[in-house]
Image (cartoon, grey):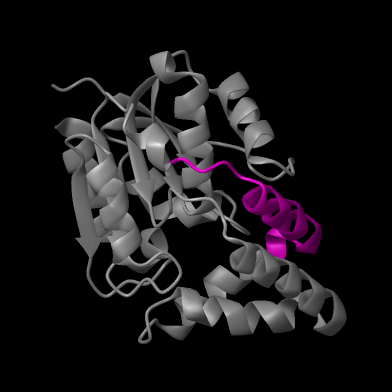
Amino acid sequence: MTRRQTLVLVPGLSCDRHVWQAQIAGLCDIAEISVGDTLKDDSIALMASRVLDTAPDRFAIAGFSMGGYVAMEIWRRAPERVTRLALVATNARADTGEQAALRRAAIATARARGFEHVLRGSLRQLVAPDCPEPLFEEVVQMALRVGFGTYMDQQAAIIDRADSLETLGTVTVPAMVMVGEADALTPPRLAEEMVQALPGSAYEIISDAGHMVPMEQPDAVNAAFRRWLEG
């Protein structure tokens, strides 16, 4: 019997452990899973430090969206502790000035018009067009649970993050890049850029999924994770 992997999952912007719920349930036979805490800090560096402080000595790590930035920072800081790396619906580049301005504008709009109002408009762009309404509502309720204060801190962390594209060239462990085929926020072209930078990485494009791929297509995501963990 294959030894279970130790796996740390890192959530994205306005996400808690619920974003990984299907993976926690569906991979428990092959992985001992913990979820990194990204809800208390306003920088990617501090998030990475917090995850490292609570993680096992050696672990596989998978980061979703903002969690991918944390995972790449962890590789920079402690590559000797990382056994495998998965980057899900994320981007290796730092924000451009225009992207940072859009994030600040989103915060200002949420403050002026209400967080939930902005969420329901913006989060609709993060799922596939045919996303079932109950699933979309799960995404909204998760973001509301995380709250506006944490949303602001996380946006500040994302704006100030380091560019990690060159860092990917130093990765020496089994790596996987995953993206939803209909992801409008971090589209496949950005995933392909990461694959080109990551030596020997696996590339998984998930059909009928937008940005929230772990929740939108859990069976396909879990199958890809199994290939990555068992390969």
Instruction: Find residue 174 and report its image quarter.
Output: top left
Instruction: State yes or no: residue 185 in magenta.
Output: no
Q: Residue sitting at 26 percent across and 36 percent down?
A: 175
Q: Is residue 75 visible?
A: yes
From this view, report whether residue 4 is shown above or below residue 93.
Answer: above
The percent position of residue 144, horizontal first and vertical second, equals 70, 67
From this view, report whether residue 165 is shown above or below residue 90.
Answer: above
Q: In which quarter of the image is the C terminus?
A: top left
Instruction: State yes or no: residue 149 in magenta.
Output: yes
Instruction: Find residue 107 and report its image quarter.
Output: bottom right
The percent position of residue 89, horizontal first and vertical second, equals 39, 57
Give the left or right position of residue 150, taking residue 111 as reference. left
Q: Residue sitting at 68 percent across and 48 percent down?
A: 157
Numbered range of the magenta stretch: 144-164
The percent position of residue 179, horizontal first and vertical second, equals 31, 60
Q: Is residue 11 visible?
A: no
Of all residues, the one furthest to the front in this rendering is 97
Give the left or right position of residue 55, taking residue 212 as reference. right
Q: Quadrant of the N terminus?
A: top left
Of all residues, the one furthest to the right in this rendering is 112
The percent position of residue 185, horizontal first and vertical second, equals 46, 69
Q: Which SS does the magenta portion mostly show?
A: helix
Q: Residue sitting at 81 percent across and 58 percent down?
A: 149
Tell which of 164 and 64 is nearer to you.
Answer: 164
Q: Residue sitting at 57 percent across and 41 percent down?
A: 162
